[in-house]
Image (cartoon, rainbow, N blue to C red):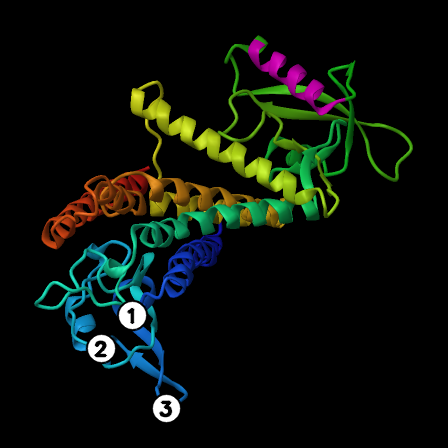
């Protein structure tokens, strides 16, 4: 694979994080919460932008110019916020929009996410997260997940509008794999296969079945097997006979001949595409939740991919887009968006779901909140576990 295609992961990840954090950001503004920073990536900071009170914008390089509390305590262990704040009034009430060094997520930093912004008398800063009702806090916390689900719906809708890829039922060659036996024999995309070893075929599935039977009959006695293919080439009246030295044990993801079926795109009416997008979102979400459940009970072996594996997968998908169209990238982005939503809503400390659980515990206790130190420690431990797991998965991805 051309390594340049790996760069496709940057806009994909960027879109997922931007949409997720924008959900937190816009609902925090709605709830009257002061948003101190909207960051892509985790600190240390590279560059930030903030409106001036007198008009215009100021550029903050490498974290310089931040308020004392923001610059001194900012850390990715603060969960969604990226750090705690003090009760002291900030030098500026405007939000910092920052780009940070560690490209593994993003954050919306709000005062009081761990209930830690209050004066000596125990009163909360009225513009802090902690000062808001349980309902508003839950809305802010769940907004990121909601935005990721909506993004998936939009992307699936675009796919159905532009054209849903459907495998052509005819025995038409859609792609010839470079360096494959089919390419060596002279087969081309758009060739129609009409017979395999003298047996007529009308569907691509017939081609697959007959070639697989030949491979099974060989029983691994040889590395290659001759397959006699009769094709009808566009622009030529007479059929062409071709012998392909097919691989008995082809590489993973490639057939014995090295060809794939033709893919056609079936567009849905504009009014129908959103409904199909919603159905597809529900189906993918259900499948993903079902897979998690099976992994938990041990029914299937855990299959977890980290950032390195996702970058590799995104690069391969981007390369395939050259042949199959950009629907492949849109489809992968939609699936990753749903994965991000489901993972974030899990009731694990430091994740959105874990923070929602803490708010619900507060409600069950009649409004009595956990001590800020205890809540902060719970989220710290959760984030530490998540980062450790990410390191382990990344090492596994690199070696595999």
Front position in the image: 351 or 234:
351
Q: Is residue 320 visible?
A: no
- The span shown in magenta is 203-216
The residue at the point 15 percent across, 46 percent down is 378
Front position in the image: 140 or 80:
140
Front position in the image: 2 or 380:
380
The residue at the point 65 percent across, 16 percent down is 209
- Residue 355, labelled with which disc? none
Q: Give yes or no for contact between labels 1 and 2 (Cβ–Cβ under 8 Å).
A: yes
Say above or below: 171 vs 108.
Answer: above
Q: Quadrant of the C terminus?
A: top left
Residue highlighted by disc 3: 54
Q: For residue 128, what is the image quadrant?
A: bottom left
Cα distance in 3D space between marks 1 and 2: 9 Å
Q: What element carries label 3?
A: loop
- Residue 90, labelled with which disc? 2
Q: Residues within 10 Å of mark 3 (few under 14, many from 20)?
A: few
Cα distance in 3D space between marks 2 and 3: 16 Å
Q: Is mark 1 on a helix, strand or loop?
A: loop
Query: 268 left or right of 3?
Result: right
Residue highlighted by disc 1: 36
Q: Can residue 132 be seen in this view?
A: yes
The residue at the point 17 percent across, 72 percent down is 69
Query: 317 left or right of 42?
Result: right
Q: Is residue 341 magenta?
A: no
């Amino acid at each position: 694979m051309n390594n340049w295609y790996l760069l496709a992961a940057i806009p994909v990840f960027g879109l997922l994080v931007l949409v997720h954090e924008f959900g937190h950001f816009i609902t925090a503004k709605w709830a009257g919460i002061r948003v101190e920073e909207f960051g892509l990536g985790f600190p240390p900071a590279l560059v930030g932008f903030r409106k001036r009170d007198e008009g215009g914008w100021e550029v903050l390089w490498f974290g310089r110019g931040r308020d004392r509390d923001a610059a001194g305590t900012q850390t990715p262990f603060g969960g969604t916020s990226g750090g705690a704040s003090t009760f002291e009034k900030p030098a500026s009430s405007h939000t910092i929009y920052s780009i940070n060094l560690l490209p593994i997520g993003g954050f919306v930093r709000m005062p009081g996410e761990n209930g830690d912004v209050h004066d000596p008398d125990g009163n909360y800063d009225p513009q802090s997260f902690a000062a808001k009702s349980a309902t508003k806090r839950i809305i802010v916390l769940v907004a990121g997940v909601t935005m990721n689900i909506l993004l998936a719906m939009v992307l699936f809708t675009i796919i159905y509008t532009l054209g849903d890829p459907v495998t052509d039922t005819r025995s038409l060659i859609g792609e010839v794999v470079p360096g494959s036996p089919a390419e060596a024999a002279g087969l081309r995309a758009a060739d129609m296969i009409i017979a395999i070893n003298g047996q007529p075929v009308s569907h691509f599935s017939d081609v697959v079945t007959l070639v697989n039977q030949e491979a099974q009959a060989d029983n691994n006695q040889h590395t290659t097997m001759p397959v006699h293919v009769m094709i009808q080439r566009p622009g030529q009246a007479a059929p062409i006979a071709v012998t392909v030295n097919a691989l008995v044990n082809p590489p993973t993801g490639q057939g014995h001949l090295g060809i794939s079926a033709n893919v056609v795109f079936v567009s849905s009416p504009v009014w129908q595409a959103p409904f199909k997008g919603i159905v597809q979102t529900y189906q993918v979400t259900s499948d993903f939740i079902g897979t998690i459940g099976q992994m938990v009970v041990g029914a299937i072996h855990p299959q977890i991919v980290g950032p390195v594996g996702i970058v590799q997968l995104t690069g391969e998908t981007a390369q395939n887009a050259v042949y199959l169209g950009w629907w492949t990238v849109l489809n992968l982005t939609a699936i990753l968006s749903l994965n991000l939503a489901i993972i974030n809503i899990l009731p694990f400390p430091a994740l959105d779901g874990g923070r929602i659980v803490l708010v619900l515990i507060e409600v069950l206790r009649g409004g009595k909140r956990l001590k800020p130190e205890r809540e902060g420690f719970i989220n710290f431990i959760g984030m530490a576990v998540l980062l450790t797991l990410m390191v382990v998965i990344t090492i596994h991805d690199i070696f595999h």
